[in-house]
Image (cartoon, rainbow, N blue to C red):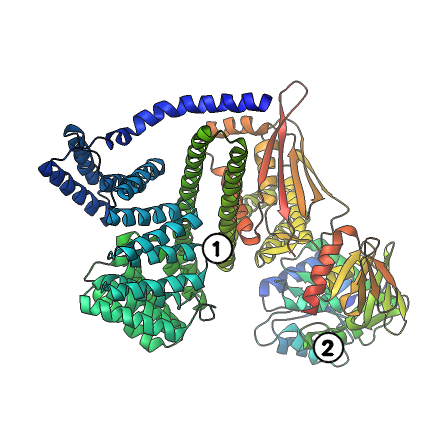
């Protein structure tokens, strides 16, 4: 029997705090709620006092956001699950930084899964500074997230999308080809990165290739079409994606 | 040999069909050969003809009165055995021209031409040439039109006739304007002014200066034809004449155009002064179209200056004035400009309201233009076939087969070119309008999307409520959060006119999951996506598929006994996505019966909205997206469901 994780709930809505408290009580035996807060100031005080393992943190609160609260803890030696009612701009940064979040109204199953992930992570390695949260605050500072958190064999890596030349699918894994001839294997499906990077300069040129338009050297029309990338690799373009590619390329340059 | 027989047969047929027509249609031809001189009768006839001309040339809606005079004159000629005079032929030609009987018009004109040439009646000869210039301009034979105008001019010069020359130059100018030859248009207007000056014809001078000045204004400040100074000085010359003549309609028109010239130059104060001056004449003169134009433009000037309240007052007055004349053109642009004003000030509902009106009037206006275009095309065709007959008849005399083919070819070519020009101009017009509408269409789309949401919301909320009483907390919570995910998706998607197909499909999936919970054991669903389609990359217009799927479930599957299936199949086809929604339900006929049994069929709201959205999507992206229904039958010929197919455009 492992130690139960000390948990604090920060949400400006009393009902939300009550609901989270009840589902923890009913479904999450590995957690124990040690504190509740309705705003940033109370939350900071509670965290300083109770030293929790996990904080359920509402993003939008009057008098300061959940991120403001986070910024006051340089060590960040607790885990955070964000709770938010709306799918706003910050979700992108949260996803980029591989931090957990749950949308309101809360789906109990999703809630339990998110809690399980934290419990598993906590049991695997001892507590320490939570790098993902630091990256999240960094990503929030610019209009476009600049650090993409990817789980590798040795833990987390934080990549600047600018340095990714292309990503190639390998069954349910993905190979990252970086500038400077670096190659990283990630145990996630290519589609997940397409979702994260698709609205930036990335283009799915082929079923198994997501390429960064920034690193396209030229387009070769022969034999159905190839793209020569900065790492000299020739990427085939699917027949049905050729027009889209040219359209994206034109937009990208313009 | 064979060919010769064939052509003879054709000619015989033509001869037979042409003869009786010739006899009944051209009694005048026979009568002209009989001459009689009875002074008072001739005077009486001349009086009647004069009255007829007065009516025909005034172009008012009393053309039938002219017919009375014409008939009386013809009757008198007949009774007194007087040959129909050339000017009566010309009058008849003009009468037929105005009533749209172009064939008779050209026949009468030919008789007038012949008669006046034989009797050296130079005035009538010149006027007939002038008329034929107008005639061929209207029927689209521009070269002929220009030649007849030129004939009229040279006859008038030789015989020193007044009034003919300026009007002929104006006719030529109008031909060049139709074929977009601005240089020749202006040259002919200059010639018109010179001729009018020589003849002391102040009306033609006034109109010439006005048109020439207006030709330098352009539609935009960057227009290639635009020359502020030229436009200003020429319009002022016209205005000076109008002021001397106290011609209120030209005074207000020239002032309004001067105002427009200043407006494009961004000299708003001067523009306002001109428009206000124009209103001083147009309003008391009941020239409502001109007044509406001035008022509307004042509205737009104040809008550009940021005085929205002032602007609104003028727009409203402009609309009132335009209503009085039922002037669709003024109505559509005023509503368009108003919509833009509301949009700028953030009042989207005002923008929408006016957009709807703008759309209504612009549709009506364009419909008018198009039907005018169609009518012209029909006239052109009729004139062509008439020419063809005439040519074939003359061919009969010459028996020249070569010419026959040549003419037939020429006529086919001419009608083909005419058709091409007509189609091209219509296409161009269409493209311009769709470009213009595009921006404001997006507001309308937003409005339509909002109408769609309640449809989802209440059905599902209702079942969640029921579910709460029947099930445990977790499954109710699942149901509720699925619903909230769907709402989130719909709201997200509605922020954009197009979304990645994956977003569209995940909303559809959520919808299907919810309905599957709601109608347990009533239906299965399947979504199949072609491998060629990358749902993350292909963007499509939002919320198009769901209403049709809902239709299949609610009207096709739910009323049937046992469990049905709805399948959604997406395939890539020629740069669009072919979406097939197929169910094995009761079919549309049975569903219609059931709906009839209940009151009305309010259920089709969803599809109706989607249909109007399809129209908008088509307008927005220039597609011709449409929905095709197929009633499926089993091997016994009984209804076995419905298939809906639509081509969804991929938006880049």
Q: Classify the position of the N terminus of chain B by image quarter.
A: top right
Label 1 with label 2: CB-CB less than 8 Å: no
Q: In this rendering, is residue A12 above or below B472?
A: below
Image quadrant where residue B23 sits? top left
Depth order, front residue of B54/B427: B54
Q: Classify the position of the C terminus of chain B by image quarter.
A: bottom right
Q: How many marks?
A: 2
Q: Residue at x 48, y 68 (%)?
A: B224
- The subunit letter for the residue under badge 2 reads A
Residue placed under numbered mark 2 in the picture:
A138
Question: Can residue B307 be seen here?
Answer: no
Q: In this rendering, is residue B557 above or below B440?
A: above
- Image spot of residue B67 (x, y percent): 21, 37
Depth order, front residue of A30/A16: A16
Label 1 and label 2: CA atoms lie apart by 48 Å
- Image spot of residue B185 (x, y percent): 40, 61
Q: Is residue B21 left or right of residue A29?
A: left
Depth order, front residue of B194/B361: B194
Q: Which mark is residue B433?
A: 1
- The subunit letter for the residue under badge 1 reads B
Image quadrant where residue B644 sits? top right
Q: Which mark is residue A32?
A: none
Q: Secondary structure at mark 1?
A: helix
Q: Secondary structure at mark 2?
A: helix
Q: In this rendering, is residue B240 above or below A175?
A: below
């Amino acid at each position: 029997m492992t130690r139960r994780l000390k948990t604090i709930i920060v949400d400006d809505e009393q009902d939300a705090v009550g609901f989270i408290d009840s589902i923890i009580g009913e479904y999450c035996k590995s957690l124990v709620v040690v504190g509740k807060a309705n705003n940033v100031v109370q939350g900071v005080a509670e965290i300083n006092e109770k030293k929790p393992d996990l904080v359920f943190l509402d993003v939008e609160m009057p008098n300061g956001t959940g991120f403001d609260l986070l910024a006051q803890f340089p060590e960040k030696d607790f885990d955070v699950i964000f709770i938010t009612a709306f799918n706003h701009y910050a979700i992108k940064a949260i996803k980029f930084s591989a931090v957990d979040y749950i949308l309101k109204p809360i789906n109990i199953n999703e809630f339990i899964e998110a809690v399980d992930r934290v419990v598993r992570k906590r049991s695997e390695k001892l507590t320490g500074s939570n790098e993902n949260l630091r990256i999240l605050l960094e990503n929030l500072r610019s209009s476009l997230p600049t650090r993409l958190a990817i789980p590798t064999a040795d833990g987390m890596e934080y990549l600047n999308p600018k340095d990714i030349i292309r990503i190639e699918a390998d069954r349910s894994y993905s190979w990252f080809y970086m500038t400077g001839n670096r190659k990283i294997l990630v145990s996630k499906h290519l589609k997940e990165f397409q979702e994260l990077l698709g609205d930036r300069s990335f283009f799915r040129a082929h079923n198994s290739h997501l390429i960064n338009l920034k690193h396209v050297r030229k387009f070769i029309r022969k034999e159905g079409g190839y793209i020569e990338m900065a790492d000299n690799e020739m990427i085939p373009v699917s027949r049905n994606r050729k027009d889209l590619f040219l359209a994206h390329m034109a937009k990208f340059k313009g | 040999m064979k060919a010769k027989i064939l052509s003879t047969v054709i000619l015989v047929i033509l001869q037979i069909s042409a003869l009786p027509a010739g006899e009944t249609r051209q009694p005048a031809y026979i009568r002209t050969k009989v001459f009689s001189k009875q002074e008072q009768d001739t005077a009486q006839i001349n009086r009647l003809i004069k009255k007829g001309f007065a009516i025909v040339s005034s172009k008012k809606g009393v053309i039938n009165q002219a017919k009375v005079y014409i008939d009386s004159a013809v009757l008198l000629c007949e009774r007194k055995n007087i040959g129909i005079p050339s000017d009566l032929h010309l009058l008849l030609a003009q009468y037929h021209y105005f009533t749209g009987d172009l064939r008779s018009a050209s026949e009468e004109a030919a008789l007038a031409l012949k008669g006046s040439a034989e009797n050296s009646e130079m005035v009538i000869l010149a006027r007939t040439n002038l008329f034929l210039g107008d005639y061929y301009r209207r029927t689209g034979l521009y070269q002929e039109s220009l030649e007849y105008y030129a004939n009229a001019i040279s006859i008038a010069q030789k015989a020193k006739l007044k009034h003919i020359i300026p009007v002929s130059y104006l006719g030529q100018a109008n031909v060049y304007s139709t074929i977009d030859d601005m240089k020749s248009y202006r040259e002919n207007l200059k010639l018109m002014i010179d001729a009018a000056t020589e003849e002391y014809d102040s009306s033609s001078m006034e109109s010439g200066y006005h048109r020439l000045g207006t030709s330098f204004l352009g539609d935009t400040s960057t227009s290639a034809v635009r020359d502020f100074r030229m436009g200003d000085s020429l319009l002022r010359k016209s205005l000076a004449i109008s002021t001397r003549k106290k011609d209120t309609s030209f005074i207000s028109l020239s002032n309004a155009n001067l105002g427009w010239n200043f407006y494009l130059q961004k000299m708003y104060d001067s523009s306002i002064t001109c428009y206000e001056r124009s209103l001083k004449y147009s309003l008391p003169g009941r020239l409502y179209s001109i007044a509406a134009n001035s008022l509307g433009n004042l509205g737009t000037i104040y809008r550009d200056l940021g005085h929205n309240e002032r602007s609104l007052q003028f727009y409203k007055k402009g609309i009132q004035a335009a209503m009085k004349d039922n002037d669709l053109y003024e109505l559509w642009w005023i509503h368009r400009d108003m919509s833009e004003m509301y949009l700028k000030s953030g009042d989207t509902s005002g923008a929408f309201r006016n957009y709807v009106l703008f759309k209504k009037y612009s549709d009506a206006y364009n419909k008018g233009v198009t039907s005018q275009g169609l009518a012209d095309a029909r006239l052109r065709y009729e004139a062509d076939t008439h020419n063809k007959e005439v040519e074939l008849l003359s061919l009969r005399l010459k028996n020249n087969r070569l010419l026959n083919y040549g003419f037939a070819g020429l006529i086919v070519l001419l009608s083909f070119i005419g058709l091409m020009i007509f189609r091209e101009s219509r296409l161009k017009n269409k493209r311009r309008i769709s470009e213009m509408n595009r921006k404001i269409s997006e507001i309308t789309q937003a409005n339509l999307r909002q109408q769609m949401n309640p449809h989802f919301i209440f059905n599902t909320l209702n079942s969640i409520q029921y579910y709460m009483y029947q099930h445990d907390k977790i499954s109710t919570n699942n149901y509720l959060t699925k619903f909230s995910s769907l709402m989130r998706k719909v709201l997200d998607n509605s922020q954009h006119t197009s979304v990645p197909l994956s977003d569209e499909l995940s909303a559809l999936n959520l919808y299907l999951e919810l309905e599957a919970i709601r109608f347990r054991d009533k239906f299965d669903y399947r979504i199949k996506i072609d491998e060629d389609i990358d749902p993350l990359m292909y963007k499509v217009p939002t919320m198009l598929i769901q209403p049709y799927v809902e239709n299949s479930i609610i009207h096709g599957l739910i009323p049937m006994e046992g469990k049905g299936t709805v399948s959604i199949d997406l395939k890539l086809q020629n740069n669009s996505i072919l979406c097939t929604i197929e169910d094995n339900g009761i079919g549309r006929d049975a569903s219609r019966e059931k709906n009839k049994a209940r009151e009305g069929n309010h259920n089709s709201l969803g599809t109706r909205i989607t249909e109007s959205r399809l129209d908008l999507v088509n307008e927005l992206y220039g597609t011709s997206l449409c929905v095709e229904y197929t009633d499926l039958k089993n091997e016994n010929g009984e209804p076995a469901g419905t298939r809906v197919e639509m081509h969804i455009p991929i938006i880049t």
